[in-house]
Image (tube, rainbow, N blue to C red):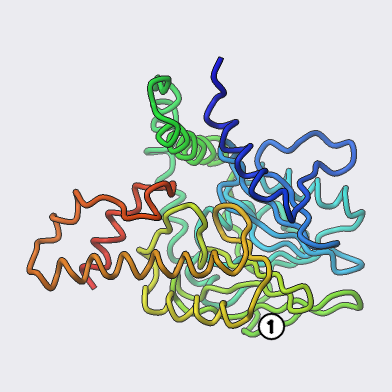
Amino acid sequence: MPRHPLHQLRSLLIVLAAATLFAFSPGAMPKPRHFTFYTLQPGVYAAIANPDGHAISNAGIVDMGSYLLVFDAFMTPHAAREMRNMAEAFCGKPVRYLINSHWHNDHTGGNQVFGDATILGTEEIRMAMREKLPDEVNSYPGFAPQTARTMAEMDIRNFNTFDSLEHILWLSYFSGIAESMDSLRITMADSIIKLPFTLESESRRVLFLHAGNGHTTGDLVMWLPAEQILFAGDLVFSGYHPWLGDGDSESLISGLNSLEQLKPKQVVPGHGPIGGPESIQTMRAYVDSVRSIANNARRLGLPADSLNTLPVPEPFGEWHLKRFFTPNLRLSYSK
């Protein structure tokens, strides 16, 4: 019997990371459903979303000596709870701080799980959550349950591997929303910080840096200078098409240039597998490609609808979340 495409993707991600990273299920705890933990360096961990789980985005955990710091909280409370339980059990200490890279639901939906910790955030992120998320969350019952049911009932046996994985990713997104929407509470930062901001302990120094408005207003990243590890949030997607509709592409290019100047050895993207500095370069190449295609169409006097049938250029043809490509082109065309 051929292997299910989900297992193929999991195997691929593990192979890609195995040379430099250690994937683990802490202690005797069962293997997590929603994510895979990786040790980047002692005391620094990445929680990488599983394709069929409800984390949807990636997160980071940093051992600060007497407490834990968490960077981003996944899309759903149940995935965030699984992460917190595993991190605290493995490290033997509590989460004291949570900070979000930006306001999008797939990075903040699990915030409520950290209500007894201090949630750090910028005024820009808190304002965006207050203004944008209530309408979004209120819209969930109108589409998420039915979309999840429809997708779950689809027969994907004749799908190729790429389309099967794409289907799994979107089914996970809609089913995650459907399963969590009744208990979801928008939970914003209760301690406002100004960037750059530093958390420092006897064992470690962590910097939070403003990275422009490339993905959303007020994007921030987490940088560990001694370890040369960068948690880039959604400024970097790896193997996944980014959503460019809530930011500014020129600011994104500028932000990526700034991240590259940090000279990180390891980069944890907001979506996709852990990489190195090349993941920043590839993300910049994607944005440049989208801008170039849109600018050429506009220069030739082609209508925006002409972008709808354009193929995804290499090397991005095998990137997932493919449905974002055409909207990204049209958004760039309109600007």
Q: Quadrant of the N terminus?
A: top right
Q: On screen, 199 above or below 285?
A: below
Horizontal and vertical percent position of residue 301: 7, 68
Residue at image coords 59%, 67%: 232
Of 119 and 34, which appears nearest the observer? 34
Which amino acid type is marked by label 1? Phe
123 displayed left or right of 136: right
Horizontal and vertical percent position of residue 67: 87, 65
Q: How many marks?
A: 1
Circle 1 — which element? strand
Residue at image coords 68%, 63%: 71
Res 194 quadrant in image: bottom right
Of 7 and 56, which appears nearest the observer? 7
Residue matched to label 1: 197
Q: Quadrant of the C terminus?
A: bottom left
Horizontal and vertical percent position of residue 142: 37, 38
Q: On screen, 223 above or below 93?
A: below
Q: On screen, 208 above or below 85?
A: below
Res 155 quadrant in image: top left
203 displayed left or right of 115: right
Residue at image coords 67%, 43%: 14
Of 295 and 204, which appears nearest the observer? 295
